[in-house]
Amino acid sequence: MSFTQRVAHLQPEGAYAVLARAQALERDGRDIIHLEIGEPDFNTGANVSLAGIRAISEGRTRYNPPAGIVELRAALAADAGQRRGMTIRPEQVVVSPGAKPNLFFPTLALVEPGDEVIYPDPGFPTYAAMIGVAGGTAVPVPLLEENDFSFDLAAFDALINERTKLIILNSPGNPTGGIMPLADLEHIAAAAQKYDCWVLSDEIYGRLVYDSPATPGGHTAPSIAALPGMAERTVIMDGFSKTFSMTGWRLGYGIMPEALADRVQLLLTHSVGCTAHFTQYAGLEAITGPQDWVDEMVAAYEVRRNLLVDGLNAIPGITCQMPQGAFYVFPNIQSFGRSSDEIANLILEAGVAVLPGTSFGAHGEGYLRLVYANSLENIARALERIGESASQLVS
């Protein structure tokens, strides 16, 4: 069969491929510790789940406005604005079934075939996928370990030009856990204004932040949208999956200038129609209800992060930076002189599922991604098995 160019380049996400192999080993009786899937291991907050159940019982199971219910859009505008120190109107908010539509649809609305789109490498695989679907030219910018996995600004400056239509950022980032410092965001903002291009800022991990002072709305990574002159050219993508442990609820949102929001909600209208009604009421409770359980979850992640990073750095041949956000570590394994795929496979055979850095782009070679959304006990067991695998490489 032949397919159009817009879909011929699409590939599965590496995490799902490794998960399938790990599950096959489990069916054969093997014990596998899963550090490959970027999903919280905590349950959704009880108050949030009850709000969703109550909404179903009250008959909130029907069509609703494509951009989302008014109450949720207003709550998101108020919360997002407070956390970022900026004013956001409800009309700028577009609610979607999961966060990915607010990556794909703004890209489809802004990028013409041949336009260049700058994106991070290593980075979330959907970035390259959506650029290709839109017909754009993908322009990867390396993330540098020596820069805490922020942009290689020299490379960025060499790549941005009059053909650049969109710059994609992700901070805190997947797969590295890095947070882009304010100075780097200011540098990128100045370039975006100079070349009159848009920024799509993926802030899905924005509240999973460690070791940093609180911003006006709490512990949140800095947003490029809050910088002078950037609100009118920035799309913020965010959602409920990571912060509120709601991956299966499929609830995300975008914040953007109203004219673009109108276009994006039309794309929603003609693709998915609307986001599940009852899910949005659960999201409303997540935003407006108690936040202590979220803070407790983040505190637990920080303890797990410290255990995993310290344990990895104690293994000969592995070095690992302390990530500032999200729930990923991105250890350097270059000293072994083997590919990321080879080492990830060796570790899987030892009973730990991890991802090779190349699942996130060519600049991920020499690294692995591990998820610490798992118990302290499992992380400790995983470290033992990884250490045993590493000893085979250095012996």
Image: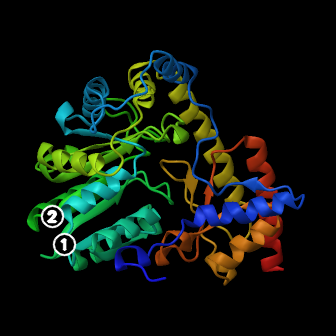
Residues at circles 2 and 1 in contact by the CB criterion of under 8 Å: yes
Instruction: Name the quadrant of the C terminus.
Output: bottom right
Task: Give, as a three-letter code, the residue at label 1.
Answer: Thr
Q: Quadrant of residue 43?
A: top right
314 sits to left or right of 81 = right
173 sits to left or right of 306 = left
Q: Residue 364, position in %: x, y?
A: 52, 73
Q: Could you say which disc has been placed on residue 32 in the image?
A: none
Q: Residue 12, position in %: x, y?
A: 54, 68
Q: Residue at x 21, y 43 (%)?
A: 226
Q: Quadrant of residue 118?
A: bottom left
What residue did someone put label 1 on?
164
Q: Residue 153, position in %: x, y?
A: 29, 70
What residue did someone put label 2 on?
197
Q: Which comes sooner in the sequence, label 2 or label 1?
A: 1
Along the line of sight, the residue nearer the viewer: 13 or 144:
13
Helix, strand or loop under label 1: strand
Residue 245 drawn above or below residue 355: above
Between the C-alphas of marks 2 and 1, the distance is: 6 Å
Task: Give, as a three-letter code, the residue at label 2.
Answer: Cys
Q: Residue 330, position in %: x, y?
A: 57, 62
